[in-house]
Amino acid sequence: MTVGWDVYLALSMAMFLEYAIWGAWAPVLAARLLGPLGMSGKQTGWIYATLPLACIFAPLISGQLADSFFAIKWILAVSQALSGLFLLVAAFQRSFWPLFGVMFLHSCFYAATLPLVNAILFQEVPDDSTRAAVFIWAPVAWALVGYFLTGWRWIFKTEKEGRDCLILGGVLALVMAVCCALFLPSNVPSQTGEIPIVKALAKLQSLDFSIFIIVSLIAAGLMQFYFLGSARFMQDIGIGAKNVPGIMAIAQAIQALATFFLLEQFIRTLGFKWMLTVGVLCWVLLYAVYFLMKPRWLIAVVQGFHGLAYVFFMIGGQIYGDSVAGAEIRSSMQALIFAVTTGIGLFLGTQLAGFVMDRAKEQEQFLWRKIWVVPGLILAACALALAALFRGAS
């Protein structure tokens, strides 16, 4: 490990809490919206769209502030304090428009923090092995916060109203605000007089970086087919509903293991070109097995391919972006990547997945092969583009 334990623990804390906040409400809030609050599916979709919409612009603003004006730790602390307060307010909203407005305000401040957790990690840690040992806390946090909430509901019976997920997320955000202010190392912005996001966008003049950004947008969007369709698909082919969450959690388990044991190795031995290509091909294989629709045990096993794809392409892509950025635009580069993937890609992907699923439906039954062929073929084309055109150069 190339950094002291105090820095490692502080960075790990930030990574853990960053994704625990999101993981506290994202998997289960829909049950509150569709159940006790009686919202429609369309209204529920728009509540969930608040984060992708915020990610289109909020990371770009925070990246600019971090590269030019303020230390990252203080942007994280202030943004998470405000995001946490808005989540706590959201827990007590019962109608659509007030809840949409408060969740959008939460999302604006939360989205501002997403690239900065990566940026301060890349700033403080030079080697990929230590970075992997910090990145591993993201999937661990997502899983542990879900188990915690499940245990809480078993003991206190709070699942009927379902606002506990928002309260938990809000408390975690406030805790992160305090921890960032107290424990994260401070940095001095470059203050070169240039506009960092303009320099980050200028990297699009490189064919490699342009291909990477385009494929990132497409791949992030097509992940929504996995998230929107997998649970219903598994139930339709005979997997019990109570087993679906555990089966899908295989992806997080494999993501954690691959982050710790394989990420550095793949970067060193394969380079960015083939690591990113392998990541996209993992999604292609996942959808190919989904297209076969059997056997059920194989459907369960291939959940691990989503975890591998996320590590090799999404996390690997964030590391690639840092490698071409330079210290003076580090935060703005991560902001650009998050705006493209978690912002534009996720939002457009949600719309595409919903459109395809509505069209591939007969008598209330989904025609799953017609659905899975769409992301499978598009991602196969993306893998070919990476293999043929991307060189992995800066």
Image (tube, grey):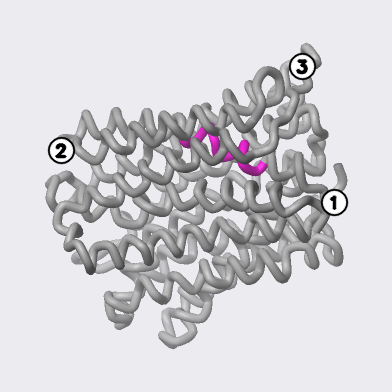
| Crowd tier of the residue under label 1, counting other residues whose Cα lies within 10 Å: few below 14, some 14–19, many 20 or above | some
Q: Residue at x 64, y 52 (%)?
A: 9
Q: Residue at x 35, y 68 (%)?
A: 231
Residue wearing tag 2: 94
Q: Main secondary structure of the magenta part?
A: helix
Residue wearing tag 3: 191
Question: CA gap, disc 2 to disc 1?
Answer: 51 Å
- Going by the numbered disc 3, the residue's amino acid type is Gln
| Crowd tier of the residue under label 3, counting other residues whose Cα lies within 10 Å: few below 14, some 14–19, many 20 or above | some
Residue 30 visible? The answer is yes
Of the two numbered discs 3 and 2 on the same chain, state the one appearing first in sequence. Answer: 2
Q: Position of residue 182 (x, y in %)?
A: 58, 36
Q: Position of residue 245 (x, y in %)?
A: 36, 71
The part of the chain drawn in magenta is 110-118
Residue 64 visible? The answer is no
- Whether tag 1 and tag 3 are in contact, CB under 8 A, the answer is no
| Crowd tier of the residue under label 2, counting other residues whose Cα lies within 10 Å: few below 14, some 14–19, many 20 or above | some
